[in-house]
Image: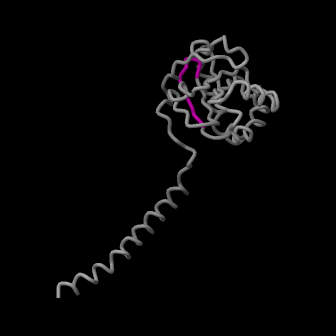
Amino acid sequence: MNESAGKPVARLVPLIAFAALVAFFVVGLVWNQTHDARFVPSPLINKPAPAFNLPRLENPTQLVSKANLLGQPYLLNVFASWCFACAEEHPTLMAYRDRFGIPLIGYDYKDAPADARGWLQKHGDPYHEVITDQSGETALDFGIYGAPETYLIDAQGIIRYKHIGPLTPAVIAKDIEPRIRELKQAGA
């Protein structure tokens, strides 16, 4: 009698497991429709950018530090010659370089300097300055997940915005340019 009482329950286990999987699937679909997968909040927003001292791409014996860039807002754009999405973003950077009204600093990420120089020579150089982080160690301090990523840093060295993925004219109009205007109006 105990054996027959346990069989109906055992038959329900696969059904319950299937129902649980369907529930997880539905929750995942709803989550993906209401949340931008590229938006990863950075704990560094409104905090000082990490200290760095990285070589210039064009002259590796010269170093650029966070202190060298203080005094005016700037965009720090993470790129690499191996990055396919960077190639997608590149024409936009070329078009907007001077329209930003602030320096556009290239951050060459985990890339051989010769490859980065060749890539910029082939595609054009939108940057006012390019620093290189071949090891990627400084990138860890910034919370860089990959390339491309772009940071808006104010004149005091505070990170005000982070965008993961390629910049597009729509992202620039909606997210970057209004923040640059705010920084200029605030004198930051």
Q: With 9 as the anchor, is 108 left or right in this view?
A: right
Q: With 56 as the anchor, is 33 left or right in this view?
A: left
Horizontal and vertical percent for residue 148? 64, 36
Horizontal and vertical percent for residue 105? 67, 23
- Residue 95 occupies quadrant: top right
* Residue displayed at 40% across by 72% down: 19
Q: Nearer the viewer, residue 4 or 154?
A: 4
Quick check: 54 above or below 4? above
Q: Nearer the viewer, residue 38 or 83?
A: 83
- Residue 156 occupies quadrant: top right
Q: Is residue 160 magenta?
A: yes
Bounds of the magenta segment: 154-163
Q: Is residue 100 magenta?
A: no
* Residue displayed at 76% across by 36% down: 92
Residue lying at the far left in this picture: please name it. Answer: 1
Quarter in which the C terminus is drawn: top right
- Residue 184 occupies quadrant: top right
* Residue displayed at 61% across by 12% down: 68
Q: Nearer the viewer, residue 40 or 125?
A: 125
Q: Nearer the viewer, residue 170 or 92?
A: 92
Tally of marks: 0
Quarter in which the N terminus is drawn: bottom left
Horizontal and vertical percent for residue 10? 29, 78
Horizontal and vertical percent for residue 118? 78, 28
